[in-house]
Image (cartoon, helix red, strand yellow):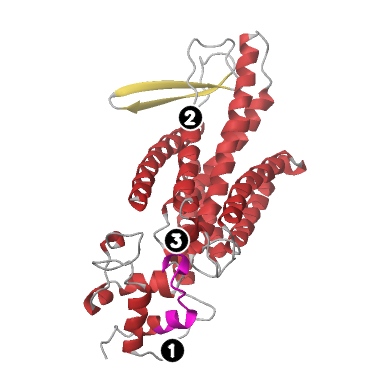
């Protein structure tokens, strides 16, 4: 009953997380487009940076952005903050339900690090806090006047954190935590910087003071960081069923390539929305394609990959001992009443039909069995892989 309850809670939290993320990302992308589309025209109010006209749903919209703020406080002001807060809160709740509640199966891999549940959860929470403080310090450091260098240091720091997580958690949890520290930086920007700075400007307007433009500039810089980090973090949040990304011995290289691809795609859209043409909006997609091909090629390479002699009888025994306890019409694992995902290995034909998934999740990674509770060895994984690549012969 507990496992079913956990699955339902996870499902509803995932749904809420996606809904919240759509709202946050949608508004973020919209305002990045809006900034790019602003035009300085005659007749704009004093202090206006530019305006933009748009049509949607049969209606026309006219938006004016002020360089700092209007002369007086408007009667109604829409704040875009709860989209971000809800996304982070539902995401962290999912980490609690999936990775903390099921720490021995998904968070901890004792072949990587023999941690207790308390130790693993403490490191997880601590890494989120540390990530924010490091990032906030970086943005306030002497490098703040050189935004490109700030982003370069941040890139190296995220990749280094990914490598560090690989030395502590299971491959899947390590990948997830890399995305989680990025998401924490992004929501931290909204909660600790963007909204407070905007409130200072609002308070100045209400008091009849002239707002200081530096607060808007700082908030805009953090918002731009969020814009370039959005696409990588989306992939890291939704890719838990694709072990070819996170199960590689050098998964931190995958992280680096995802960060580059996401940033380059955003560069294209930001430039395109700003009305740029020619080479300025043509170089991005070849670069993205090159890195995507690189990820595919890299995912199939292992430093110690080899084909070994196999016995069909021994291979079937490996499946029976390590896989069928869960993936069967009648699972013997106490946590499953039905085969996860409906995937069953009761017959040779069923094994053959899922051979590519077995190779991806059990041979090229140690994602399965969960938490390696059966103690499957590397030699068994290699023998199983050779047998499956040979077509899983009966004899």
Lateral position of residue 148 relative to residue 182, left or right: right
Q: Which mark is residue 308?
A: 1
Q: Which residues are magenta?
A: 368-383
Secondary element under disc 3, as helix, strand or loop, is helix
First along the sequence among labels 1 and 3: 3
Quadrant assignment, res 25: top left
Instruction: Between label 2 and label 3, give the one nearer the viewer.
Output: 2
On the image, the x and y values in percent for residue 274 come to 49, 37
On the image, the x and y values in percent for residue 310 come to 38, 89
Q: Which mark is residue 189?
A: none
On the image, the x and y values in percent for residue 378 come to 48, 79
Of the pair 256 and 124, the residue shown nearer to us = 124
C-alpha gap between disc 1 and disc 3: 34 Å
Q: Which mark is residue 289?
A: 3
Q: How many other residues sit within 10 Å of disc 3, few (<14), some (14-19) or many (≥20)?
A: few
Quadrant assignment, res 13: top left
Q: How many other residues sit within 10 Å of disc 1, few (<14), some (14-19) or many (≥20)?
A: few
Q: Residue pushed farthest top?
A: 208
Instruction: Between label 1 and label 3, give the one nearer the viewer.
Output: 1
Circles 1 and 3: CB atoms closer than 8 Å: no
First along the sequence among labels 2 and 3: 2
Viewport quadrant of the C terminus: bottom left
Secondary element under disc 1, as helix, strand or loop, is loop
Residue at 31% from the left image edge and 67% from the top image edge: 332
Of the pair 43 and 358, the residue shown nearer to us = 358
First along the sequence among labels 1 and 2: 2
Q: Which mark is residue 82?
A: 2
């Amino acid at each position: 009953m507990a496992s079913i309850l956990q699955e339902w809670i996870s499902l509803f939290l995932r749904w809420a997380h996606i809904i919240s993320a759509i709202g946050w990302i949608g508004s973020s992308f919209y305002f990045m487009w809006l900034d790019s589309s602003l035009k300085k025209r005659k007749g704009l109010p004093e202090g206006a940076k530019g305006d933009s006209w748009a049509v949607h749903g049969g209606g026309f919209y006219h938006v004016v952005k002020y360089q700092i703020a209007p002369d007086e406080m408007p009667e109604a002001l829409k704040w875009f903050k709860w989209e971000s807060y809800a996304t982070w809160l539902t995401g962290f709740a999912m980490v609690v339900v999936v990775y903390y509640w099921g720490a021995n199966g998904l968070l901890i891999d004792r072949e990587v690090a023999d941690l207790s549940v308390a130790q693993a959860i403490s490191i997880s929470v601590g890494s989120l806090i540390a990530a924010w403080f490091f990032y906030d310090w970086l943005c306030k450091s002497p490098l703040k006047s050189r935004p490109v260098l700030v982003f370069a240091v941040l890139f190296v720091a995220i990749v280094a954190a990914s490598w560090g997580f690989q030395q502590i958690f299971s491959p899947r949890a390590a990948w997830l935590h890399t995305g989680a520290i990025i998401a924490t930086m992004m929501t931290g920007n909204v909660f600790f910087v963007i909204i407070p700075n905007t409130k200072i400007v609002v308070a100045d307007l209400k008091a009849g003071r002239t707002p200081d433009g530096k607060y808007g500039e700082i908030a805009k810089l953090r918002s731009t960081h969020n814009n370039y980090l959005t696409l990588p973090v989306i992939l890291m949040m939704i890719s838990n069923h694709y072990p070819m990304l996170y199960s590689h011995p050098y998964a931190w290289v995958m992280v680096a390539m995802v960060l580059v691809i996401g940033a380059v795609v955003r560069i294209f859209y930001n430039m395109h929305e700003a009305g740029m043409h020619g080479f300025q909006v043509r170089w991005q997609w070849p670069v993205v394609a090159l890195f995507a091909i690189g990820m595919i090629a890299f995912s199939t390479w292992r430093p110690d990959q080899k084909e070994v002699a196999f016995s069909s009888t021994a291979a079937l025994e490996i499946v029976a001992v390590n896989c069928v306890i869960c993936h069967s019409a009648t699972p013997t694992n106490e946590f499953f009443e039905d085969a996860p995902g409906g995937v069953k290995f009761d017959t040779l034909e069923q094994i053959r039909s899922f051979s590519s998934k077995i190779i991806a999740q059990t041979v090229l990674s140690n994602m399965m069995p969960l938490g390696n509770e059966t103690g499957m060895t590397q030699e068994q994984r290699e023998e199983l892989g050779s047998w499956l690549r040979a077509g899983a012969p009966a004899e």
